[in-house]
Amino acid sequence: LINCRRIIVVCSCCTKSWVDMVEPRSQQLSSQPLNMAAAAAAGVSPTEVDRLMELFECLDSSRTGKVDAQRLAMIMRRSNSGIVSDDEVEFMEAWIKNVVSSPVDVIGFCRIYALAPKEIQLALGDACIL
């Protein structure tokens, strides 16, 4: 049961509860239609999409289902992933603002992440560790 999630279920009719151990979240999500669509759109594996969906959920702090270029650029600027020069930060922000012309949903985020230079992937990937 390593890496399993614990779910506590409470019965509404008798208030009994029990704990159920389920497969790791990534094994459950990979076969969902949204994950399969995101994987196909981004050209990445369904398992990678699981990770990106969790990252997107973290980045979407307002819970609107969308993130915009300004939010992504702010997250990258705050990221601790390596020491980068001002020029590199400006390049990363310009890339994001050029590619993300309007707010993106999780599928759009997966596509953008897959296309992004490695420095941007690293900066965004570390965003929720902060």
Image (spheres, helix red, strand yellow):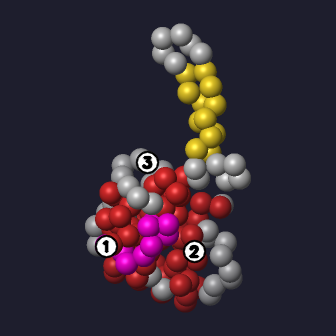
* Residue furthest out toward the right: 2
Disc 3 marks which residue? 62
C-alpha distance separating marks 1 and 2: 22 Å
Mark positioned earlier in the residue sequence (1 or 3): 1
Q: Residue 123 carries which label?
A: 2
Q: Look at label 3 and name its amino acid.
A: Ser
As drawn, the label of residue 107 is: none
Q: How crowded is mark 3: few (under 14 residues within 10 Å), some or many (20 or more)?
A: few
Name the outermost residue toward the front: 1
Residue at 69% from the left image edge and 49% from the top image edge:
1
Real-space CA distance between mark 2 and mark 3, rounded to the nearest whole angstrom: 20 Å
Query: Going by the image, does 111 lie left or right of 81?
Result: left
Question: Where does the magenta region start and end?
Answer: 41-49
Q: What residue type is labelled 1?
A: Ala
- Tell me residue 65's x, y (percent): 36, 52
Taking the magenta stretch, the answer to whether it contains residue 7 is: no
Query: Secondary structure under badge 1?
Result: helix
Q: Residue furthest left?
A: 102
Figure check: 65 above or below 45: above
Element on which disc 2 rests: helix
Main secondary structure found in the magenta portion: helix
43 is higher (above) or lower (below) than 28: below
Residue 118: x percent and y percent?
Answer: 53, 84
